[in-house]
Image (spheres, rainbow, N blue to C red):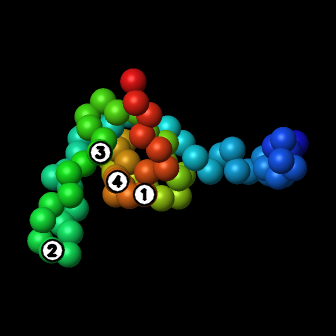
Amino acid sequence: AQAVTPGGVIIPDTSHEATMDAEVVAVGPGAVLLDGKRHGMQCSVGSKVVYAKFGVKKLDYQGEEYLICKEADLLIIIED
């Protein structure tokens, strides 16, 4: 079934499966900018995030499955 927004936009059923949510378990130091400075991370360990299902890489490490992505690929960081 398709959902329709109040503005009349039709949201296909498949779009609901295109995003996932997760909890951040580790972060890197941040991206290096063109001027050589480092951009600080906006999310931190414990942050809840929403990401595009196909925008992450899966990693199996010591029997656990982890997802790896760039912070820029996150759709939203949910603040507590």
Residue drawn at x 81%, y 43% is 5
Mark 2 belongs to which amino acid? Asp
Taking 32 as reference, is 43 above or below it?
above
Residue assigned mark 3: 42
Taking 42 as reference, is 46 above or below it?
above
Q: Please name which of the two marks, 1 or 3, marks the residue nearer to the observer.
A: 3
Q: Compare marks 3 and 4 and give the one earlier in the sequence.
A: 3
> Could you tell me how far apart the alpha carbons at marks 4 and 2 are, in whole angstroms?
19 Å
Res. 71 mark: 4
**Mark 3 nearby-residue class (10 Å; few <14, some 14–19, many ≥20):** few
> Could you tell me how far apart the alpha carbons at marks 4 and 1 are, in whole angstroms?
5 Å
| Mark 2, secondary structure of its residue | loop
Q: Compare marks 1 and 2 and give the one earlier in the sequence.
A: 2
> Could you tell me how far apart the alpha carbons at marks 3 and 4 are, in whole angstroms?
8 Å
Image location of residue 53, percent across then percent down:
54, 52
Answer yes or no: is residue 5 visible.
Answer: yes
Confirm or deny contact between disc 4 and disc 1 (CB under 8 A).
yes
Residue drawn at x 40%, y 30% is 79
Toward the top, the furthest residue is 80
Residue assigned mark 1: 73
